[in-house]
Amino acid sequence: MDESTIFKNEETLSSEYLPDILPHREQQIKELSKNLLPASEGRKPINTFIFGASGIGKTASVKFVFREFENFSGVKTVYVNCWDYKTSVALLSKITIDLGYPIQRRGWAKDEIVNRFVETINKKGKSLIICLDEVDQLDQDALYDLLRINQYVKSPVGLIFISNNSHVFATLEPRIKSSLAADDIEFKPYSLEEMKKILGERVKDAFTSVENGAIAIIANQAVNKGGDVRIGLQHLLKAGRLAEQENSDKLTVEHVKKVLKEVKAVKPEIMKEKINEHEKNILNMMEKDQIIQTGDLYIKYSESVSSPVSDRMFRDCLNHLAQLNLVKIRKRKLKGSIRLVSKV
């Protein structure tokens, strides 16, 4: 095959690619590094809860810090997506295997796996940091078991939790909440200018030549579709492949415009899997094209479920649904300020 005249390194447009710098996440990276630093000295790090919308650098920032820690401190790090490992057995087996010790995935009792996990950490003799991404998918018992591990190991274990939902721990059992003691780090959505810079850095590594204006169009599209960097990267990749098919030596604005409608925001069906039972109940009772005051919706919700959440928790649930772009919330000023909510 002929060498591409468009791409220098197509891999840099992958959402899995971890660049050497993460623009506009310097402060969050600094805070997370500070929380983990004690582990490099054999002391217990500060557990950290990272939250914010999808596609705004949460996972990438943790993996960036993990890479630096592994290279320079000797601290061992393990990343786990809880969507794939929800139970104690699955989670502890996954971590033990990642630490380099074989374990049967089936047929072992939980106590056996806990013992092997503790034995593995003690043999390593180094601090361990575990990232639990999409922690809202994790069983409460699994979280409880992991929080208690420091009682049995010689080297400290630190935990990082990642979620789109800032209130993911609100309904935890008291025995688990009391052990959590996590420092919060919020990731706010990127502005248009920040999105342009982030995509611009990827473009430098990915393409040989790009027409002025192409990045701005894609950045605007990504911001309008929820601020997800991955959407911008998909646009760049599709536009680049179109340019390649046309034997162009430059990615142009015209290439970008042709693929704008092809890249969709994250499918609502997938986003619905990221919500809790209370949020599902709220969403299910809302009718398409209905616009309703939040107070009226809370009354309707309270009358339809056996154990409704508090008014404050209900507002938190609505805010999370809005963050996932499953509902839209608008404010209207009449005699006072009221909030109107509708299904997207």
Image (tube, rainbow, N blue to C red):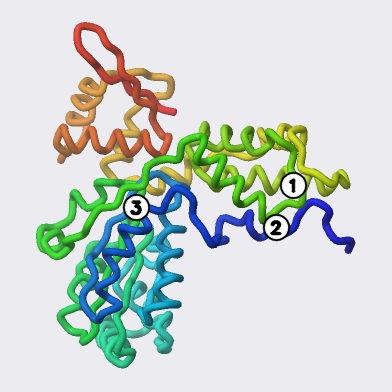
Residue drawn at x 11%, y 61% is 178
Q: Distance between the Cα atoms at labels 3 and 2?
A: 29 Å
Mark 1: amino acid = Gly
Q: Choose between 205 and 218: the one closer to the eye.
A: 205
Q: Distance between the Cα atoms at labels 1 and 3?
A: 32 Å
Q: Estimate how packed mark 1 is, as few (under 14), some (14 to 19) or many (20 or more) residues with alpha carbons within 10 Å.
A: many
Residue under circle 1? 240
Residue under circle 2? 10
Cβ–Cβ under 8 Å for marks 3 and 2: no
Q: Distance between the Cα atoms at labels 1 and 2?
A: 9 Å
Residue under circle 3? 163
Q: Estimate how packed mark 2 is, as few (under 14), some (14 to 19) or many (20 or more) residues with alpha carbons within 10 Å.
A: some
Residue drawn at x 35%, y 34% is 284
Which of discs 1 and 3 lies nearer the camera? The answer is: 1
Q: Is residue 54 above or below residue 15?
A: above
Q: Earlier in the sequence, mark 3 or mark 2?
A: 2
Mark 3: amino acid = Ser
Which of discs 3 and 2 lies nearer the camera? The answer is: 2
- Determine the secondary structure under disc 3: strand
Mark 2: amino acid = Glu
Cβ–Cβ under 8 Å for marks 1 and 2: yes
Q: Is residue 322 above or below residue 234?
A: above
